[in-house]
């Protein structure tokens, strides 16, 4: 079925565009920093200018939106962004040194007419995005299209934020939206039940007439209620997989561990159930992606995960990343909670190593094998 509910013939291969796309999953600060390392390595390989689209959800959207905000200032020389460290890596490391989820939940519970998500948006505004809006992301011809994904709890489908428009295919489209990036990223990372939902207040008249499939009416067009983009698309695949022939997937998502005694109180039990759903949906999506890559030879798909074992990738010159240490990093809680300098560096180094092994194995050698980790400690830094 396509987005409009129409049948698509199973024997037909949809046309693909030549181009490179990147997906950044959710997973709190863990995913954000893992993606930072991945982007650092993609930059060294000279691949950032080749990106046509960057799609993100939840924690991945913090990294993606920051990259989009500073894209025009990165100072590319021979396809390498020379200011990536100071404009992209450093601000996100500073954010990861702060706990913003606990006080947001508390403030949302006790300050009238506010929610945890609204306080998260304030923190993003203060520490990462300032007053920037979606219109500060690269326009067409200025860089890749950044797609920041949230889930519309009213329509049950994706709500996509971009520079040229924001859209829910059922509700409709608003062209050139001026929403603050902090609000957009807070919506994308509004993980339920504690940081969700985020409510938008929109002018129904701002929607393009006839752009919605079946819900272009109030209150859908005036008070959208959004939650984490990972609820619908935890790998941020929808915006790229059917469109581009080369897709890079950075998965910083968590993994649910067995619990001999599972909590029975409703907050912790609800959280456990949501973790189970996320884990299962992520696994099903990845099976579908890998099956697609296997049977559609037009495609190149490189996938790497915070739980990957780089020894399984065929590229030569891989960095040493002991799988036991990588699994310890993968167990970092899905939180927006302070991480130490050594934890941050280990996660960035791990994203760097995993991206390197996957991209050089399945897309191309780029500029060759890396000499060392960014922080020269490797994933054992913790």
Image: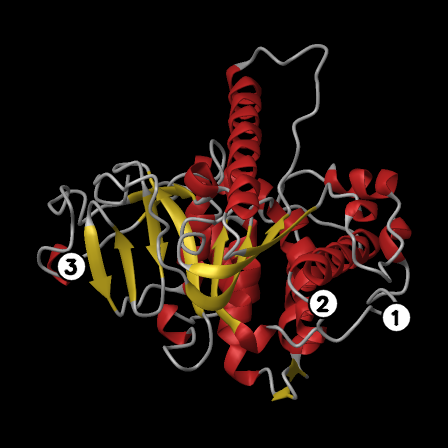
Image quadrant holding the N terminus, namely: top left
Identify the residue at image location x=74%, y=50%. 339
The location of residue 99, given as percent across then percent down, is 64, 49
- The image's mark for residue 41 is 2
Foreground mark, 3 or 1?
Answer: 1
Q: Identify the secondary structure beneath mark 2.
A: helix
The dot on residue 371 is: 1
Disc ID at residue 207: 3
Which quadrant holds residue 15? bottom left
What residue appears at the point 11 percent right and 45 percent down from the top-left corner? 217
**Is 344 rendered above or below residue 273?**
below
Gap between marks 2 and 3 measured at Cα: 39 Å
What residue sits 15% from the left and 46% below the top?
A: 213
For residue 261, which quarter of the picture?
top right
Of the numbered discs 1 and 2, the one sitting upstream in the chain is 2
Compared to residue 219, the image places residue 354 above or below, namely: below
Q: Report whether 162 appears left or right of 209.
A: right
At a point 41% along the width and 51% down the height, the residue shown is: 149
């Amino acid at each position: 079925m396509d987005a409009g509910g129409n049948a698509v013939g199973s024997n037909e291969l949809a046309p693909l565009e030549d181009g490179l796309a990147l997906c950044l999953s959710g997973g709190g600060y863990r995913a954000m920093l893992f993606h930072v390392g991945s982007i650092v390595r993609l930059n060294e390989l000279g691949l950032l200018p080749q990106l046509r689209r960057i799609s993100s959800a939840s924690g991945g959207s913090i990294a993606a939106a920051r990259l989009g905000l500073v894209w025009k200032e990165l100072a590319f020389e021979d396809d390498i962004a020379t200011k990536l460290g100071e404009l992209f890596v450093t601000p996100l490391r500073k954010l990861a040194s702060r706990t913003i989820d606990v006080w947001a939940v508390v403030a949302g519970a006790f300050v009238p007419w506010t929610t945890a998500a609204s306080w998260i948006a304030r923190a993003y505004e203060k520490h990462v995005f300032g007053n920037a809006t979606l219109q500060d992301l690269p326009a067409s011809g200025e860089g890749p299209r950044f797609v920041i994904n949230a889930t519309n709890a009213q329509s049950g489908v994706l709500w996509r934020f971009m520079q040229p428009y924001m859209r829910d295919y059922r509700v409709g489209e608003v062209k050139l939206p001026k929403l603050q990036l902090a609000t957009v990223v807070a919506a994308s990372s509004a993980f339920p039940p504690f940081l969700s939902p985020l409510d938008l207040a929109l002018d129904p008249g701002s929607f393009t007439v006839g752009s919605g499939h079946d819900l272009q009416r109030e209150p859908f067009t005036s008070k959208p209620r959004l939650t984490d983009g990972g609820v619908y698309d935890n790998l941020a695949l929808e915006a790229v997989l059917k469109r581009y022939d080369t897709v890079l997937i950075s998965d910083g998502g968590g993994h649910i561990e067995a619990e001999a005694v599972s909590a029975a109180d409703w907050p912790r039990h609800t959280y456990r159930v949501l973790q189970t759903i996320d884990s299962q949906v992520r696994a099903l999506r990845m099976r579908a992606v890998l099956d697609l890559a296997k049977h559609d030879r037009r495609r190149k798909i490189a996938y790497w995960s915070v739980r990957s074992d780089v020894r399984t990738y065929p590229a030569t010159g891989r960095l040493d990343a002991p799988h036991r240490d990588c699994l310890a990093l993968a167990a970092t809680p899905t939180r927006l909670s302070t991480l130490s300098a050594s934890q941050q560096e280990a996660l960035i180094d791990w994203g760097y190593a995993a991206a390197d092994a996957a991209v050089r194995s399945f897309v191309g050698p780029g500029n060759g094998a890396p000499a060392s980790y960014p922080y020269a400690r490797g994933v054992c830094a913790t």
